[in-house]
Image: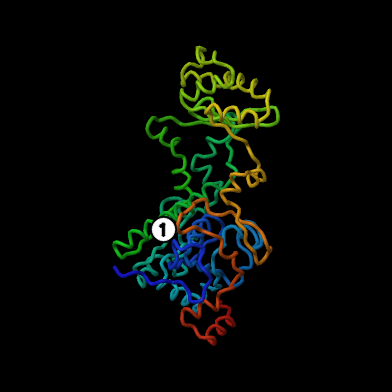
């Protein structure tokens, strides 16, 4: 198979990474799941062209100056196109003829009505990787329902196992269905690109918030599928490893994770309670699970006598996993988080000097960086259209007509 043409633009700034440099991605996404997917490609060096409606000064979920937009749309270029106009649609299709990837998270029927669905674009570009993220899948009885993270958390079972027993369902504190669907879509794109290197053919990559959420149930789903057990809420207690959970200290709270008999013995010694090892209620893991409330009360009566930092030092020294429970400010002040470089500087068009969350993956030769802030709407329209072969007069005419 011939090597795909590079889409690195002449005179362009250095990409965010060399890992995906030369790949062109057309970004039709909004809100969170789709932009999460595309951010993975942009941060690793792909030439991402964000397609926006000419009147779209703001996005669903907040203004361009807001933290959400700023964190999701860095390392991209912006092209405004009215895909409902003849000229705007023609320009998009011309872009798609040589693009490597298109990513969209419209409701399933929208792309067909616009004439930018996979079959239409792949007819002119058989090597195209076309990724779709939806709420519930591209077909099936619920395909046309609008997708929303909390809805997926509920329908996907997560809310039934989150929160304290007896207090009703509870959502988790981040949009986990959105985020995971975006990450799975990015993974699917990378798999399709690797397969294309062998076959020379593109394909349609699909995932949804519901699929992502059910997959992320992981061992809880396996407990049901294999043993017929419907997991229930356990609050801060781990559902299977006891005692693992949150315990009060003299100045706050801490996490302790006691998994397996070896760590259980170390923990009992560190807490000054070797008698727990021979207590009939706690001798085995099933017994500790059965008597978790009594054991938790005994542990907390001890942990409340000393400060969190003291306990963490003691337990870590004994080989027992333990850690602080930080608020978000404390997270970014943590010396290990600072060492890992998770907050990265950028100069935003709207906000000036600020910081965004960097990639959680380190690569020894092709690292990622925040090379450019989120673009202004249409900032690169003339530049990208010129790359397609449009002349200055044609670009001006498209601007005057509202097509760009």
Q: Is residue 151 left or right of residue 193?
A: right
- Image location (x, y in percent) of residue 102: 44, 65
Q: Please, is residue 8 above or below residue 289 in the view?
A: below
Q: Quadrant of residue 358?
A: bottom right
Determine whether the residue tagged by mark 1 lies in a helix, strand or loop.
helix
Q: Quadrant of residue 98?
A: bottom left
- Image location (x, y in percent) of residue 53: 57, 70
Which quadrant holds the C terminus?
A: bottom right
- Residue 121 vs residue 285, the one in the foreground: 285
Q: Please, is residue 194 above or below residue 288 in the view?
A: below
- Residue 220 vs residue 382, the one in the foreground: 382
- Residue 245 vs residue 346, the one in the foreground: 346
10 Å crowding of disc 1: few (<14), some (14-19), many (20+): many
Q: How is the image coloured?
A: rainbow
Q: Kindly give the residue lying farthest to the bottom in the view shown.
A: 393
- Residue 380 vs residue 400, the one in the foreground: 380
Q: Quadrant of residue 400?
A: bottom right
Task: Tell me what residue is drawn at x 53 percent, y 71 percent.
Answer: 13
Q: Which residue bears the numbered disc 1?
A: 189
């Amino acid at each position: 198979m011939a090597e795909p043409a590079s889409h690195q633009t002449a005179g362009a700034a250095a990409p965010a990474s060399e890992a995906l440099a030369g790949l062109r991605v057309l970004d039709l996404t909004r809100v969170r799941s789709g932009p999460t997917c595309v951010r993975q490609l942009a941060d690793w060096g792909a030439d991402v062209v964000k397609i926006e409606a000419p009147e779209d000064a703001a996005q669903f979920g907040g203004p361009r100056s807001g933290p959400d937009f700023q964190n999701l749309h860095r390392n991209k270029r912006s092209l405004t196109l009215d895909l409902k106009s003849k000229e705007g649609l023609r320009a998009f299709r011309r872009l798609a003829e040589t693009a490597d990837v298109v990513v969209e998270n419209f409701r399933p029927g929208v792309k067909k009505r616009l004439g930018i669905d996979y079959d239409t674009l792949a007819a002119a570009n058989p090597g195209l990787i076309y990724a779709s993220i939806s709420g519930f899948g591209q077909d099936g009885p619920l395909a046309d329902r609008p997708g929303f993270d909390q809805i997926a958390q509920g329908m996907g079972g997560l809310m039934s196992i989150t929160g304290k027993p007896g207090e009703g369902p509870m959502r988790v504190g981040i949009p986990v269905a959105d985020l995971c669907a975006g990450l799975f879509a990015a993974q699917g794109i990378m798999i399709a690109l690797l397969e294309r290197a062998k076959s020379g053919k593109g394909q349609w990559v699909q995932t949804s918030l519901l699929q992502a959420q059910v997959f992320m149930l992981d061992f809880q789903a396996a407990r049901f599928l294999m043993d017929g057990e419907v997991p229930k809420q356990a609050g801060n207690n781990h559902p299977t490893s006891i005692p693992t959970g949150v315990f009060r200290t003299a100045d706050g709270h801490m996490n302790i994770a006691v998994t397996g008999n070896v760590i259980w013995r170390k923990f009992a010694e560190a807490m000054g309670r070797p008698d727990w090892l021979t207590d009939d209620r706690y001798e085995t893991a099933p017994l500790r699970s059965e008597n978790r409330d009594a054991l938790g009360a005994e542990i907390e009566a001890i942990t409340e006598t000393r400060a969190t930092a003291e306990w963490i030092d003691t337990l870590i020294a004994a080989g027992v996993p333990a850690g602080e429970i930080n608020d978000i400010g404390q997270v970014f002040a943590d010396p290990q988080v600072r060492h890992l470089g998770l907050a990265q500087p950028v100069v935003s068009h709207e906000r000036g000097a600020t910081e965004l969350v960097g990639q959680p993956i380190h690569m020894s030769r092709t690292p990622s960086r925040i090379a450019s802030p989120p673009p202004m709407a249409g900032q690169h329209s003339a530049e990208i259209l010129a790359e397609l072969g449009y002349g200055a007069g044609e670009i001006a005419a498209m601007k005057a007509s509202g097509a760009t």
